[in-house]
């Protein structure tokens, strides 16, 4: 909405520079505004002041032709319509006009798509005939919504932002329920002006009209003076627009508000207490964003980001921890250790992490305190083994050492002892062999004796 207003404001200022009186909305400007330039009347015709360079409208007149409106009075209504047409900037691309006639029934005399010049419109108005009985004002407004304010009947698309305006002219009290129908029309974006004549019910006029009521409800005593309303509507539709002309002090947006204006700001900005200037909104303030981790202000808006070790999910709001130890994501020389969205480096066994916390160096496994050898530590590529000093041998536990039994040269005394021992061993052996022979002989004699005893 703000962007649309900004575009319209820019167009309005451009037209204002060219001297056009462009109205962005329908509420009336102050009567006798000093900002309206005076114009000289054209010889032989209406004054130039009767021509209105108003903003394009889709304008529908709904006129009461019930029995209470006498034929001569209805002719006055048609004169009023013709003079209103003269005040408008009529055309296919400017203001389009439709006329509806109602009593107990409703007749669309011509829709918005039919005539795009004043002469044709006025000729069509001159041919309108009254319908007589009944005053079904609610039905008439409902018909305008259903059958006239449609693109098929000439209403321009909502994207063009062309105001939809209804002017109801009546001299009586509605015979149907008009309040809900009028409210629906206003909700649908239709601006309603109510013109009462003579016996018109003022409460009904106020019920159907748009706000502010003092700018949308008109009353005249008789149809004979209805033409004087022409100048009031001309001032309403041709009112000087300070936003369009650029004669305002808004820093960013000017929005017309009845006879005055209000200032507004671009998206991402907020109006300051002076009601004129704007300040950028801190879109990353608590409660203003829905980022999971980090909010980054971005020219009146914001984008979401994540802490190191996290990545933004496709929803552009939440974050997921990255696998920091995936190939190519870390700079560890040997071992990468994931740690809740971050990582640290480690080393293989036998290596130690260098001060840069990334690379590794081989450990001196035989340094004091790093091994459990009792005597000698022998360093390998990554591991160590134990050994012993000369004269010691390594125990089965591969760590401790025991004194070794070693051979040496034999002395003469030791040699004699050895020979004596050997001779003794030989003597004993000989004696044992002789004894064994005697035992065999005894055993044989004993066996012979036993044999003889058995014979006897």
Image: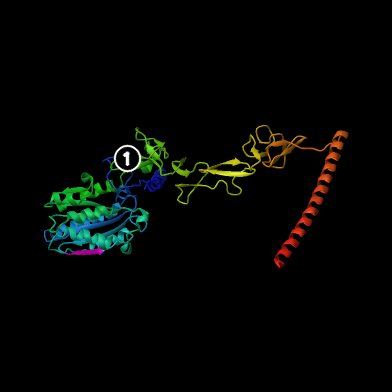
The answer, for residue 221, to whether it is visible in the render is: no
Vertical arrangement, residue 256 with respect to residue 142, above or below: above
The percent position of residue 341, horizontal first and vertical second, equals 51, 43
Question: In which quadrant of the rendered view does residue 445 lie?
Answer: bottom right
- What's the residue at 34%, 43% (across, down)? 255
In screen coordinates, is 207 left or right of 450? left
The answer, for residue 329, to whether it is visible in the render is: yes
In screen coordinates, is 277 left or right of 81? right
Question: In which quadrant of the rendered view does residue 177 lie?
Answer: bottom left
- Residue 108 colored in magenta in the image: yes
> Dot 1 lies on which element?
strand
Nearest the viewer among 380 and 248 is 380
Nearest the viewer among 208 and 132 is 208
> Magenta span covers which residues?
105-109
Q: Which residue is mark 1?
A: 261
In screen coordinates, is 110 left or right of 102? right
């Amino acid at each position: 909405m703000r962007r649309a207003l900004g575009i319209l404001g820019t167009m309005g200022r451009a037209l204002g520079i060219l001297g056009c009186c462009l109205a962005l909305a329908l509420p009336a400007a102050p009567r006798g505004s000093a900002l309206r330039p005076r114009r000289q009347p054209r010889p032989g015709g209406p004054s130039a002041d009767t021509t209105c360079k108003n903003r394009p409208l889709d304008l529908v007149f709904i006129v009461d032709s019930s029995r209470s409106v006498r034929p001569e009075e209805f002719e006055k209504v048609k004169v009023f319509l013709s003079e209103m047409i003269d005040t408008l900037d009529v055309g296919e691309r400017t203001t389009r006009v439709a006329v509806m006639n109602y009593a107990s029934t409703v007749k669309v005399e011509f829709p918005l798509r039919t005539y795009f010049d004043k002469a044709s419109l006025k000729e069509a108005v001159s041919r309108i005939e009254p319908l007589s009985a009944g005053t079904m004002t609610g039905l008439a407004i409902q018909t305008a919504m259903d059958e006239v304010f449609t693109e098929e009947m000439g209403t321009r698309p909502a994207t063009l932002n062309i105001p939809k305006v209804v002017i109801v002219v009546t001299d009586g009290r509605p015979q149907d329920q008009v309040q809900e129908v009028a409210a629906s029309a206003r909700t649908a974006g239709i601006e309603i002006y109510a013109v009462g004549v003579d016996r018109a019910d003022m409460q009904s006029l106020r019920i159907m009209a748009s706000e502010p009521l003092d700018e949308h409800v008109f009353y005249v005593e008789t149809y004979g003076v209805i033409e004087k309303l022409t100048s009031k509507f001309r001032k309403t539709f041709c009112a000087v627009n300070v936003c369009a002309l650029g004669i305002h002090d808004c820093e960013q947006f000017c929005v017309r508000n009845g006879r005055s204006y209000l200032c507004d700001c671009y998206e991402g900005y907020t109006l300051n207490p002076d009601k004129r200037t704007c300040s950028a909104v801190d879109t990353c303030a608590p409660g203003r964003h829905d980022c999971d981790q980090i909010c980054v202000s971005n020219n009146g808006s914001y984008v979401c980001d994540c802490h190191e070790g996290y990545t933004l999910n496709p929803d552009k709001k939440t974050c997921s921890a990255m696998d920091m130890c995936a190939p190519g994501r870390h700079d560890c020389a040997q071992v990468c250790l994931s740690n809740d969205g971050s990582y640290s480096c480690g080393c293989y066994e036998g290596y130690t992490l260098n001060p840069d916390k990334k690379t590794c160096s081989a450990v001196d496994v035989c340094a004091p305190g790093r091994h459990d050898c009792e005597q000698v530590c022998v360093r390998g590529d990554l591991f160590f083994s134990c050994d012993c000093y000369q004269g010691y041998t390594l125990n089965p536990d591969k760590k401790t050492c025991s004194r070794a039994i070693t051979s040496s040269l034999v002395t003469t005394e030791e040699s004699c002892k050895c020979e004596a021992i050997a001779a003794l061993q030989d003597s004993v052996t000989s004696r044992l062999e002789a004894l064994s022979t005697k035992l065999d002989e005894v055993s044989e004699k004993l066996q012979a004796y036993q044999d003889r005893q058995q014979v006897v």
